[in-house]
Image: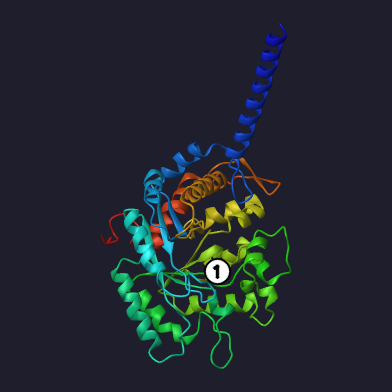
Amino acid sequence: MASLTSNRTLLSLATTVLVALILFASVLLSASPNGTEPASRPAADLANFSALAPFDAHVHLYKDDPAFGALFKHLNLRVLNILVIDDRDAFGKALEPQRSDALKVRHVTDGRALFCTTFSPYGFEDPGFAERTIRQLDADFAEGAIAVKIYKVMGMEMKSKAGKYVMPDDPAFEPIYQSIAAHDRTVVAHIAEPDSCWQPPNTASPDYEYYQQHPEEYAYAHPEWPSKAAILAARDHFLAQNPKLRVVGAHLGSMETDVDEIAKRFERYPNFAVDTAARIEYLMMQPRDKVRAFLIKYQDRVLYGTDLVVMPKDDTEKALAEWKNAYARDWTFFATNKTLDLKGRKVQGLELPEPVLRKLYHDNAVRWFPGAVAGEVRVTR
């Protein structure tokens, strides 16, 4: 009898432990990165997401793993794979190897990862700079590049030989912009940074960890840098000077804290759109009705983007989970009225009308990036 009682006690204890482990595993599986949680299971959200043939207009994918091709096919997804040159970054110091990596990714995704090239602006005062840059871009266009990235080093790092900070509207770049427009390609312009870049450290900021990890990009620590207002004024002048050039302002055009500021530029510059990359939290932080009205009114001018990054040595399984969770979270925010948790704060989804969702996730990419649709990009085998 003592033995039977002991066995029953052990069985009860084992059952309790098993239930606890199952509950713990369910908590882990339901967690989502970026401080938010999907309001429903990702599988259901991603089925609706995939039905729109979505286009993520802002990623940096440098790992040519077939698993990404399988994911893109499963999600019916295309992405714009963007190169960046920044001499402060070991991987981004030059066009290679990132250019070759991007072309390999395009191959392994069967053309679903479209190619956005860039150019080095650092030699802008050297003789023949514009001509050499145009030749390089022409070669990339022949290789299928549908866009060109310009980067925040314009205004936030580069100086002329005379010691003046170089802005995106510098005359040295004008022949390049004109050539891009003549080729019917689009500029992706990451100019300036969030307001928090110029402000004291704030643990509540969505960008706090980024600037802790990248102090060389933190304008607050560099009071000698131009103000954000001066940089955006130069960006606006660049838009005005190139009315025939399509420009997509990355990261909500660095006007992330108030959609009214974006609306002002939309009214002034018909050649300007923005993507949502890495700034959706800022939309969540603004009044729901205001953001919803903005996206409906300017439904032809906003492109969905994430800024998801995968480097050559990153763990594939971890990256795939991050991508799926990001897409599920964002879909919940834009497409439903469900509640999400944003770092302890409840946020209600926008429940945008289906025609607006279709433009945000698909149609605007086709319009602002000619060649983004299937069959229009020559894929090198």
- 179 sits left or right of 264 in the view: left
Q: Amino acid at mark 1?
A: Arg
| Whether residue 118 is situated above or below residue 315 in the rendered picture | below
Q: For the N terminus, which image quadrant? A: top right
Label 1 packing within 10 angstroms: few (<14), some (14-19), many (20+) = some
For the C terminus, give its image quadrant. Answer: bottom left
Residue 132 point in image, percent of width and height: 36, 84
Scheme by which the image is coloured: rainbow
Most extreme residue toward the left is 381
> 337 or 82, which is in the foreground?
82
Residue occupying the point 51% across, 65% down = 250
Considering depth in this image, is 111 or 28 the residue closer to the camera? 28
- Residue 183: x, y in percent? 32, 73
Instruction: Give the labeled residue for mark 1.
Output: 265
| Image-based side of 356 in relation to 261, left or right | left
Furthest residue toward top: 1
Whole-percent x and y of residue 150?
47, 73
Residue 144 image position (x, y, % from top left): 31, 66
Q: Residue at x 59, y 49 (%)?
A: 33
* Image quarter of residue 11: top right
Q: Residue at x 44, y 68 (%)?
A: 83
Residue at 32% x, 80% y is 135
- Is disc 1 placed on a helix, strand or loop? helix
144, above or below 306, in the image: below
**Picture mark count:** 1
